[in-house]
């Protein structure tokens, strides 16, 4: 059991080790940031909570990674898909760190542009809500085949537009107006990766256990996710 922000977290069942490893990595990044910055966040709790909602909704919404894991684990099972999952997580973190470098570089070259990046981020979030509404259920193929690899999951992130725009919009809209130090950016790279990784794990579990249920109620699920994204977009610019 772990404690964060006054609440206890316990990851049960056979996925305890996977979930705890993600959680521990996230907490180590958080502690490193707190020590480096004297334990003070310049951003308000309202901004941090809004970022968390955006990261949660985006990380858990249908996208290339989650849809791929839904179909892959439905076909191969969770155990045979773990190399693909860890490749996705490693590539995801790499992209978040690269997005941090890009966002800071843009802010230094065009410092006046940073306050307006939130509007671009809000527009992208609305576009993401629209694409979520159009998502169709994924039905896994039957049969056998070669296990999905770590490399394929890692390389996918470099052509995954959703992940790249997710990192740039979150960092430029929510983080850079308040934090720009290296420890802060590293922390938020892990922060965004944490939500993405948990979303991947949920969709992988859905694929291996509940795919038929998702395929039946996918429209209701997509509408809920889209509405949450619209909320994030509106809250970002108000």
Image: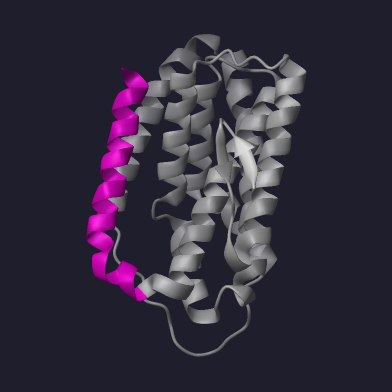
- Image quadrant in which the C terminus is located: top left
Vertical relation: 114 (above or below) 231: above
Residue plotted at (28% across, 54% down): 222
Q: Answer whether residue 217 is magenta in the image.
A: yes
Residue plotted at (62% across, 55% down): 19
Quadrant of res 111: top right
Q: Position of residue 56 (x, y in %)?
A: 45, 42
Q: Position of residue 45 (x, y in %)?
A: 48, 20
Quadrant of res 83: bottom right
Residue farthest toward the bottom in the current orientation of the protein: 143
Q: 166 or 79: nearer the eye?
A: 79
Residue plotted at (57% across, 17% down): 107
Residue farthest toward the top in the current orientation of the protein: 112
Please state if 126 lies on the left or on the right of 118 as rendered: left
Q: Position of residue 26 (x, y in %)?
A: 66, 40
Q: Which residues are magenta?
A: 212-238
Q: Is residue 13 visible?
A: yes
Q: 112 or 222: nearer the eye?
A: 222
Q: Answer whether residue 25 is magenta in the image.
A: no
Residue plotted at (33% across, 30% down): 233
Q: Is residue 134 visible?
A: no
């Amino acid at each position: 059991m772990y404690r964060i922000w006054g609440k206890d977290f316990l990851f049960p069942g056979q996925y305890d080790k996977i979930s705890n490893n993600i959680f521990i990595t996230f907490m180590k990044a958080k502690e490193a940031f707190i020590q480096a910055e004297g334990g003070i966040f310049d951003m308000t709790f309202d901004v941090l909570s809004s970022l968390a909602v955006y990261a949660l909704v985006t990380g858990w919404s249908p996208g290339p990674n989650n849809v791929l894991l839904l179909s892959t684990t439905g076909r191969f099972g969770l155990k045979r898909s773990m190399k693909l999952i860890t490749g996705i997580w490693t590539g995801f973190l790499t992209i978040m760190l690269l997005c941090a470098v890009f966002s800071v570089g843009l802010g230094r070259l065009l410092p006046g542009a940073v306050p307006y990046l939130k509007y671009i981020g809000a527009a992208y979030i609305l576009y993401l809500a629209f694409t979520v509404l159009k998502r169709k259920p994924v039905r896994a193929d039957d049969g056998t085949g070669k296990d999905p690899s770590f490399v394929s999951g890692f390389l996918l992130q470099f052509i995954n537009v959703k992940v790249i725009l997710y990192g740039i919009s979150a960092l430029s809209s929510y983080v850079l107006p308040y934090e720009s130090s290296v420890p802060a950016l590293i922390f938020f790279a892990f922060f965004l990766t944490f939500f993405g990784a948990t979303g991947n794990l949920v969709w992988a579990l859905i694929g291996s256990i509940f795919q038929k249920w998702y395929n039946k109620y996918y429209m209701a699920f997509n509408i809920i996710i889209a509405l949450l994204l619209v909320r994030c977009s509106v809250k970002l610019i108000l």
